Image: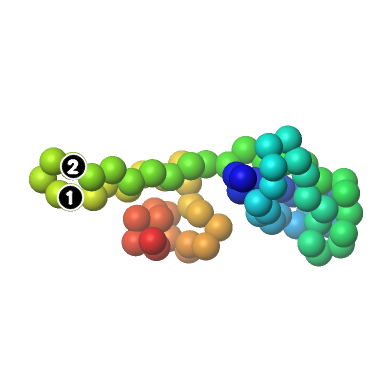
Amino acid sequence: MPIYEFICQDCEKRYERLVRSGGSAPCPHCNSENVRKLMSGFAFRSKAADGSVTASSGGKCSGCSSSSCAGCH
């Protein structure tokens, strides 16, 4: 199951949930069902022939305060 990012239309809180494709998750802050799925960035790592690791991200992850998640994981 993929992780989706949601925003509550009532209390405007953002949160992530592991849900089945096409599913939804009520707001954990106010229990509202009035939520919208957000477009989320993605991240990947690749290993070069020389053994170095390259990380790329579509943006900051929710657990980081830096602009790159390369140092977070």
What label sits on residue 52 in the rendered view? 1
Q: Position of residue 69 (x, y in %)?
A: 40, 55
At 48% from the left and 63% from the top, the residue drawn is 65
Measuring from the top left, give residue 14's x and y in whole percent: 70, 54
Comparing 1 with 71, the one in front is 1
At label 2, counting other C-alpha atoms closer than 10 Å, the crowd grade (few under 14, some 14-19, many 20 or more) is few
Determine whether label 2 and label 1 are within 8 Å by CB. Answer: yes
**x and y percent of residue 5 in the render?**
66, 48
Residue situated in front as seen by the camera: 11 or 63 = 63
Q: Amino acid at mark 2?
A: Ala
Residue lying at 68% horizontally and 37% vertically, measured from the top left? 21
Residue 46 located left or right of residue 27: left
Give above or below for 43 relative to 67: above
Helix, strand or loop for disc 1: loop
Residue 1 in sight here: yes
The Cα atoms of the two marked residues, 2 and 1, are separated by 5 Å
The amino acid type found where label 1 is placed reads Ser
Q: Residues within 10 Å of mark 1 (few under 14, many from 20)?
A: few
Identify the residue at horizontal 13%, vertical 41% (top origin). 49
Name the side, left or right, on which 48 lies relative to 9: left
From the viewer's perspective, tell me whether residue 44 is left or right of residue 4: left
Which quarter shows the N terminus?
top right
Q: Quadrant of residue 11?
A: bottom right
In this rendering, is residue 51 above or below 31?
above
Give SS at disc 2.
loop
Residue at mark 2: 48
The residue positioned farthest toward the left in the image shown: 50
Coordinates of residue 63 in the picture (x, y in percent): 52, 62
- Residue at 17 percent across and 50 percent down: it is 52
* Numbered label attached to residue 8: none
Q: Which quarter of the rendered picture does the C terminus lie within? A: bottom left
Would you say residue 10 is visible in this rendering? Answer: no
